[in-house]
Image (tube, rainbow, N blue to C red):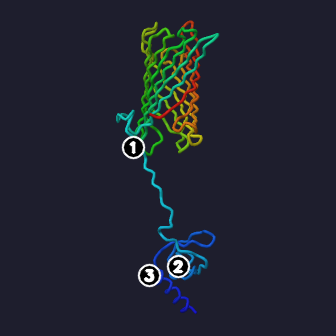
Amino acid sequence: MKLSKFTSFLFILIVSNLAIATEVRLGNGDILNGKVIEDEDGNITLIHPTLGKLALPFAKVIKPEEKPAVQIVEKPVDRGLLMTGLLKDWERSFEAGVKGSEGNSRNMNINAGLRFKFEDERKRWDVTMLYLRSEDEGEKSQDEFFARFNRDFLIPGASHFYFTEGRYDFDDFQDWDYRLNFGAGIGNEFVKTDDWQLNGRAGIGARKDFGGEDSEWVPEAVLGIESNWAIAERQSLEFRNSLYPSLKEVGEFRNITTLNFKVGLAQLNGMDLKIGLINEHHSDASAGTDKNDFKYLLSLVVGI
């Protein structure tokens, strides 16, 4: 008996090595991979690597030409910003929004911005520019612009990183002409998954107002937290809060909060709708100006 089993095993082993590996479709549509040793009028004998020798009635050997073709989708070649080669392989976008009315009252609000992002295993860039302008009854009521950058120095395999940041502000309705601030420090990636990233930052920096009453450099601490959540395909929620306590005047601080919700528009392929909220709080705001400067934006975003 033992010899008979051994002989059968040896037969299967020898035949399986001589047979040609192929795919067999069963009557219910399932597919088995193995080596066919007999194929006669739909009655197939198959050597399966796990199940051994199988007799399969009403089965069919799948011919190579019957296999579904694999569709290879080639990734478009990135030719850079406006086909110039600049910022190649960066995430680039332009946004714009317009709101106005004519009749009993006449007003217009426009906003336009650019954003450039890049990340690899050793560096991460995030550059944002935004211009805002409003007119009421033909008179300018808002005219401001800011540009900021974050440059993170990443360490492969580590959650902490080092960063530098900078920001330029112009606001025609402030007592200063323009403002510069810079900072640097250390950050940490508390969460980093395919769908969600949560980072914290801490460091020191300085701020200077040009053209205002206070023209000295003001040392500041830098405390920040930022969250990027990919809710679904072409849906994302971004939150960023940056706190700048003054190291010169105890109790004085600046705080900038940004919240952006972006959703893809199915009717407009490649275009997104963005709802943005920005609030800037200045505890030492100039006389005649509010400590909080709140803005809400509705924009269309397109890759460039």
Mark 1 surroundings: few (<14), some (14-19) or many (≥20) residues within 10 A = few
For residue 132, side relative to residue 180 (left or right):
right
Closest to the observer: 221 or 3? 3
Placement of 174 over or under 87, stated as above or below: above
Q: Secondary structure at mark 1?
A: loop
Residue matched to label 1: 77
Mark 2 surroundings: few (<14), some (14-19) or many (≥20) residues within 10 A = many
Q: Position of residue 158 (x, y in %)?
A: 45, 43
What's the CA distance linking mark 2 and mark 1?
Answer: 46 Å
Which quadrant would the N terminus be assigned to in this image? bottom right
Residue matched to label 2: 47
Name the mark nearer the viewer: 2 or 1: 1
For residue 92, side relative to residue 232 (left or right):
left
Residue matched to label 3: 18
* Residue drawn where x is 51% and y is 84% of the image: 12
Name the mark nearer the viewer: 1 or 3: 1
Task: State yes or no: discs 3 and 2 in contact (Cβ < 8 Å).
Answer: no
Identify the amino acid type marked 3: Leu
Residue 284 appearing in the image: no
What's the CA distance linking mark 3 and mark 2?
Answer: 11 Å
Examine the image and state in which quarter residue 121 appears: top left
